Image (tube, helix red, strand yellow):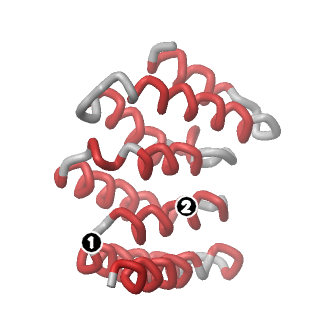
């Protein structure tokens, strides 16, 4: 399937079926990436679009793509990580889905250096402080995961 078909299916998935559609497309997306040594530019920008466009992040299931990023992280360069962080920080205020918020914080904790992760979490903490109570606490979860990752590496 092409990225345009992926986008079409994700955009048109009903909220009640989006979790399954996102999982299926993320699996296909991951299979596509197996054919590349480096992370293809168009695939990376597709992910940024998913993380920054309401039509995609407002539906359940986007977190599946963060799992793919974690698995294929060895193909990303430092500039990719900077762009991802900027995208997440720029859109985190709009993320209402608990699974997505947790997946974003988990991804940051497991895939960024301690210094970079803490800097990103400081920004997300400020954003999260202005969210409703039911959308809070994910940065703390991310910091706990980061602490566990640091302990595991020592």
Relative depth, front residue between 73 and 82: 73
| 79 on left or right of 113 | left
| 79 on left or right of 48 | left
Residue at (54%, 25%) from the top-left corner? 28
Q: Which mark is residue 103?
A: 2
In the figure, 81 relative to 151: above or below? Answer: above
Q: Which mark is residue 113?
A: 1
User: Picture quarter containing residue 6?
Assistant: top right
From the image, which quarter does the C terminus lie in?
A: bottom left
In the figure, 107 relative to 114: above or below? Answer: above
Residue 50: x and y, percent? 48, 40
Residue at (42%, 80%) from the top-left corner? 152
Residue at (46%, 47%) from the top-left corner? 51
Residue at (26%, 72%) from the top-left corner? 113
User: Does dot 2 land on a helix, a strand or a loop?
Assistant: helix
User: Picture quarter containing residue 56?
Assistant: top right
- Please tell me how crowded label 1 is: few (under 14), some (14-19), or many (20+) other residues with Cα within 10 Å: few
Relative depth, front residue between 91 and 106: 106
Residue 33: x and y, percent? 39, 29
Distance from the alpha carbon under mark 2 to that under mark 1: 17 Å
In the figure, 130 relative to 64: above or below? Answer: below
User: Does dot 1 land on a helix, a strand or a loop?
Assistant: loop
């Amino acid at each position: 399937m092409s990225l345009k078909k992926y986008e079409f299916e994700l955009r048109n998935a009903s909220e009640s079926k989006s979790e399954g559609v996102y999982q299926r497309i993320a699996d296909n997306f991951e299979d596509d990436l197996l054919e590349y040594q480096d992370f293809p530019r168009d695939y990376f920008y597709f992910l940024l679009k998913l993380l920054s466009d309401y039509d995609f992040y407002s539906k359940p299931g986007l977190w599946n793509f963060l799992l793919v990023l974690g698995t294929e992280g060895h193909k990303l360069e430092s500039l990719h990580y900077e762009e991802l962080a900027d995208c997440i920080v720029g859109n985190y205020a709009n993320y209402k889905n608990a699974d997505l918020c947790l997946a974003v914080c988990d991804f940051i904790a497991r895939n960024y250096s301690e210094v970079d992760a803490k800097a990103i979490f400081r920004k997300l903490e400020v954003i999260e402080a202005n969210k409703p109570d039911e959308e809070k606490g994910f940065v703390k979860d991310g910091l706990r995961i980061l602490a566990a990752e640091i302990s595991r590496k020592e």
